Image: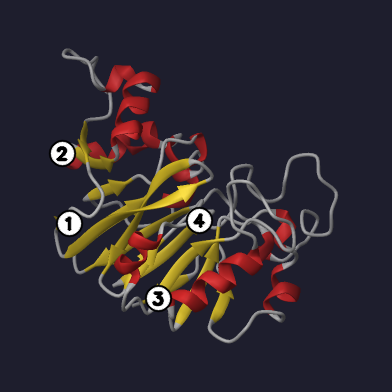
Amino acid sequence: MKITILGSGTSGGVPSVGCGCEVCLSNDKHDKRLRTSALIEEGETRVLIDCGPDFRQQIMPFDFKPIDAVLLTHYHFDHVAGIDDIRPFCSFGPVNIYADKKTVKALHDTIPYCFTENPYPGVPLLNLQEITPHAPLLVGDISITPFVVMHGKLPIMAFRMGKMAYITDMKTIEPGEMEYLNGVETLVVNALKKNKPHHSHQSLEEAIDFAKKVGAKRTYVIHMSHGIGKHQETSEELPEGVELAYDGLVVEV
């Protein structure tokens, strides 16, 4: 299985508009972070996790071939705003989108033209399907188990695929959900910034502690703001087995 980090940034991306901090002014490509998303590939199967406002830019470098499924973690704009840009891939047939009940409703409310009985020509052909936690689904060659993490007070989806788990926007996780992380060797997880607690996102320190509890051999940090610090400098502070992800990073599992 191959994981490509399409975007590693928080909701506003990095650089942050109007900011003159050293991270936002950095010339290091690792400090340029589009909104968080990932492409999972196994054999001929391709699965996209989240589809934010940078999706068109993120997918352009890849071969134009089908996307077998889009997994949505939750309905916040930075995770769903690129869904209309999926329409070129509908030339291969309807694109399956999997989301929890609240996200399904939110999409019906925000892009209703995609789900009318008589859509106008050119509308994205989307097969929107509601998923429930812990009920596995099979997409081509990839078996996926959704589970729940807490984004502040909002329950959102995380995904287990083999010995890899993908978690974004988490602040906490209920003890009962930890069993879905048993045996995870590769962990992708969020951290907003260093040293400053946030009401709905982990700090870098919290993410490191969480990775230790999971026992993953490799942990890649995503959904970072400029508050994470410069990539090179912060990377030198991390414990063994924990790395800052960056846009374009490819991980083989």
Pointers 1 and 3 in contact (C-beta within 8 Å): no
Which quadrant of the view contains residue 75?
top left
Q: Which residue sits at x=23%, y=60%?
A: 144
Q: Residues within 10 Å of mark 4 (few under 14, many from 20)?
A: some
Marked residue nearer the N-terminal end (4 or 2): 2
Name the residue carrying label 2.
93
In the structure shown, which secondary structural element does the residue marked by tag 3 occupy?
strand
Q: Is residue 124 above or below residue 141?
A: above
Residue underneath mark 1: 136
Q: Amino acid at mark 1?
A: Pro
Q: Of helix, strand and loop, which one carries label 4?
A: loop
Closer mark to the observer between disc 2 and disc 1: 1
Q: CA distance from mark 4 to mark 3?
A: 19 Å
Residue position for label 4? 172
Q: Is residue 51 visible?
A: no
Give the residue pinned by disc 3.
186
Q: Position of residue 214 (x, y in %)?
A: 43, 75
Residue 27, x across and y down, in percent: 76, 62
Viewed as shown, does residue 157 lie left or right of 193? left
